[in-house]
Image (cartoon, rainbow, N blue to C red):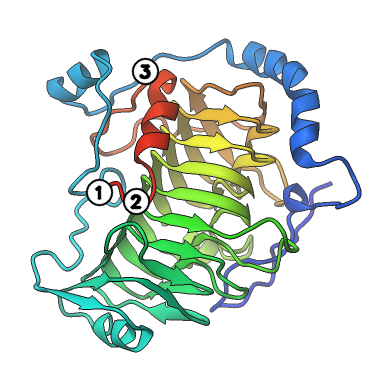
Amino acid sequence: MRSTHDHGTTDDTTDSTMDADDVMDATRVTPRDRRRLTAVAAGVTAALALGGLSTVSAHGADAADSARSATGARPTAETTPIGFGAGTTGGGNATATTVTSLAAFTSAVTGDKAKVVKVSGLISLTGQVDIGSNTTVLGVGSGSGFTGGGLRLKQATNVIVRNLNISKPRKPSDGITVQKSTKVWIDHNTFSADRDHDKDYYDGLLDINHGSDNITVSWNKFADHFKGSLVGHSDNNASEDTGHLKVTYHHNWFSDVYSRIPSLRFGTGHFYDNYVQGAETGVHSRMGAQTLVENNVFRDTEVAVTTSRDSDVDGYAVLRGNDLGGAATEISRTGSFTTPPYAYTAEPASSVVATVTAQAGVGKL
């Protein structure tokens, strides 16, 4: 029997309810201990089911990209997004404005004219600040960003958010919410909270919902949290979300994030070259979502990919080239999304940990 815990979410909030794969019991053996006890058996099962690791793919890659992969050269920070968010330019070449206070930041990101806003220092906030269209938000150095709340992109288009520390977003605020928005690039940020509180004390680190589309999430670090990244807030939102929620996640580091890495409803997700470390449940494809899971590395993770939990309708997944590291998989339906409609090079899983741990998060641009 499947539960429907996520139903009934209101229009202006993202899901903060408890999925079965999120439930914690403080009196039981810790998830990490349980993962270690089951890793060997799960790894044998997963390896047999997948028939070993698949070969590296380089769909749409040019000869130079293929040569870089063949010689072991690692990718570096992009100047433009790869994936579904390709073509996002944000504020472009607009003259940058540097802000050091919440009031100055709120004023600087308002409106839809082209603008580049640099955040210097760590700013405390309650709730979320709305970001206008045609905006680039860029943290200065490695110690700038926001704590206590987050940013919201609502009915916005063409937005870039890079090099920010976003920490401890108190419920009902996510670290970043993308709502009814298109063409978004979220890159080289560090999202974090802690695991010392109840799972609903903080909200999501990055949630994408309400028909948002054409988004790339790249080179970010997500750490010490229960609810990582939710794409599609409710099982009841098919009319708005179907045909949308196209999201690429690549070269992200998920460290001790319990679940939703990501959880995807209705949409189309490409999850490649990510490092998932210390999760209970990783990629969760549900409500007919199509997900391609490619050349990722999972460590100390119980279930790397599932298509069959919590919702009335299962999702779809295609797995290739992943290093499951002993994690199990729950694939009830194999997907049809195998060739993304953009150029990219998926480096082999064997180099992902070194690449991602060296280059993901703030201070690496």
Res 237 → quadrant = bottom right
C-beta proximity under 8 Å, tags 1 and 2:
yes
User: What percent of the width, then of the height, locates residue 342?
Assistant: 25, 38
- Give the residue furthest to the right: 27
Which of marks 2 and 3 precedes in the sequence? Answer: 3
Which of marks 1 and 3 precedes in the sequence? Answer: 3
Tag of residue 220: none
User: What percent of the width, then of the height, locates residue 245?
Assistant: 43, 56
Q: Residue at x 33, y 36 (%)?
A: 340
Tag of residue 188: 2
Tag of residue 56: 3
Between the C-alphas of marks 1 and 2, the distance is 7 Å
The amino acid type, in three-letter code, at marker 1 is Leu
Res 59 → quadrant = top left
Res 200 → quadrant = bottom right
Tag of residue 365: 1
Between the C-alphas of marks 3 and 1, the distance is 26 Å
C-beta proximity under 8 Å, tags 3 and 2:
no
The amino acid type, in three-letter code, at marker 3 is Val
**Above or below: residue 74 compared with residue 99:** above
From where the camera sits, is residue 178 visible? yes
184 relative position to 125: left or right: left
Foreground label between 3 and 1 = 1
